[in-house]
Amino acid sequence: MSIFRLAYNNIRGSAFRSMVIFMCVLGVASFLLGTTLVISGAQNSLNVGIQRLGADILVVPEGAQTQVETALLMGKPTNVWMPDSKVAEIAAIPGVEAVSPQIYLQSLYGAACCSVSEMFLVVYDPATDFTIKPWLEKELGRPLNTGEVIGGSYIFVPTGQTSIKLYGYNTDLVGNLEATGTGIDQTLFMSTATAEAMAKSSLTTAVQPLLIPSGQISEVMVKIVPGADRHKVALDILSGVLGVVPLESPNMFGQFRHQMTGLLWGFVAIMVVFWILSAVLIGLVFSMAANERRREIAVLRALGATRFYVFRSILAEAVILAFSGAVIGVTLATFVIYLFRTYITSSLGMPFLFPGWGSFIGMVAAGTAFILLTVVLAALWPAYRVSRMEPAIAARE
């Protein structure tokens, strides 16, 4: 009889014991992969979101840093304003190559054209823009016309309609940006011409008109000269332009990063305790199983089975239980995380972007290997001890 066949029969013959080990493995695998997915998904979302912004520095009104970061990260509505004269002041700072203002309009709640409860409206200036323009050139091959908009991955045209109506004004959705897992996914981008036409139309077509303060902007996107020191440019903006705060793109979302670090260490602590308890329990179960099977092992030895064969048969049982529990555990964790990702991210207050297939497969492989190693190590001593017993002694006990 092959070793794995013998191990399989032993698992079937000891259903309760095997189920205890299986559930421990499943729990460790699910929690391990689930934790890794949430943390890596948040980090992935953060990196993709910063890349999507496409600016080296984001300049916002003084005191509005948290509001703007929350709006960009989680799509939360915000109204922040500063004089548009700040654009020229920022452009005059040494090391600044390009500047482009953006306006945050009042968010829409319960919009029929968005798969989330809130939709964020952002207006950009086509004449100076360098963040939306590259996507338009690549995907559309032309700039947006008046009345055309592009949206994040959550934005869509309502069923049965051909356009998105905002403040009583019909807009044509001509494309969607790649998913980032951040507030950009529920953001609708439009040109200044479209925003002005919408505001004018809303005076007669909307229950609540769209009001855009004259001479005001919400923030300024800054691109620095290649080779320039980003941090020095940011300090020069801070000291040279009153009433604004520069946010360097690599250092954005500092509060979120701090929160994510704390959450990570909390998950790690729980994971270590859970792993140790599970490993101890698995070791105890295998020790009990080895004691119960002394007579069976004595018969195997009497029939010519070597000590190494007995040793390998117990380890094979451990491998089968570990592998099956790990596979089902990671499958369950993946399904739950993917299905409830929106609820999880809103509850934890962090963005989430499911990792790419390469990263995901790497996580699954690493997690499965870790689980296999844990269970094999837990079964190692009981397997060694019982395999070293003399057949005659084992048969009498």
Image (cartoon, rainbow, N blue to C red):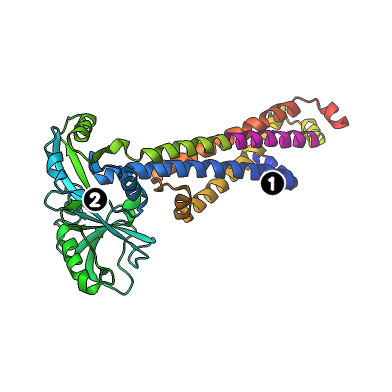
Question: What residue appears at the point 27 percent right and 42 percent down from the top-left corner?
Answer: 62
Magenta residues (range)? 272-292
Q: Position of residue 142 (x, y in %)?
A: 13, 57
Dot 1 surroundings within 10 Å: few (below 14), some, or many (20 or more)?
some
From the viewer's perspective, is residue 7 above or below residue 307?
below
The disc placed on residue 195 is: none
The residue that label 1 is drawn on is 19
Dot 2 surroundings within 10 Å: few (below 14), some, or many (20 or more)?
some
Q: Quadrant of residue 379?
A: top right
Question: What residue appears at the point 22 percent right and 62 percent down from the top-left corner?
Answer: 211
Task: Give the amino acid type for the residue marked by disc 1 in the picture.
Answer: Met
State the count of labels. 2
- Which quadrant of the figure contains the N terminus? top right
Q: Position of residue 146 (x, y in %)?
A: 15, 63
Task: Give the amino acid type for the residue marked by disc 2 in the picture.
Answer: Trp
Q: Position of residue 68 (x, y in %)?
A: 31, 47
The mark lying in front, picked from 2 and 1, is 2
Decide which of 19, 392 is in the foreground and name it. Answer: 19
The residue that label 2 is drawn on is 81
Give the mark nearer the N terminus: 2 vs 1. Answer: 1
Q: Position of residue 147 (x, y in %)?
A: 18, 65
Question: What residue appears at the point 40 percent right and 45 percent down from the top-left corner?
Answer: 355
Decide which of 70, 364 is in the foreground and name it. Answer: 70
Q: Is residue 250 visible?
A: yes
Q: Quadrant of residue 64?
A: top left
Q: Which residue is the extreme one toward the front? A: 242
Question: What residue appears at the point 14 percent right and 46 percent down from the top-left corner?
Answer: 85
Main SS class of the magenta portion in the image:
helix
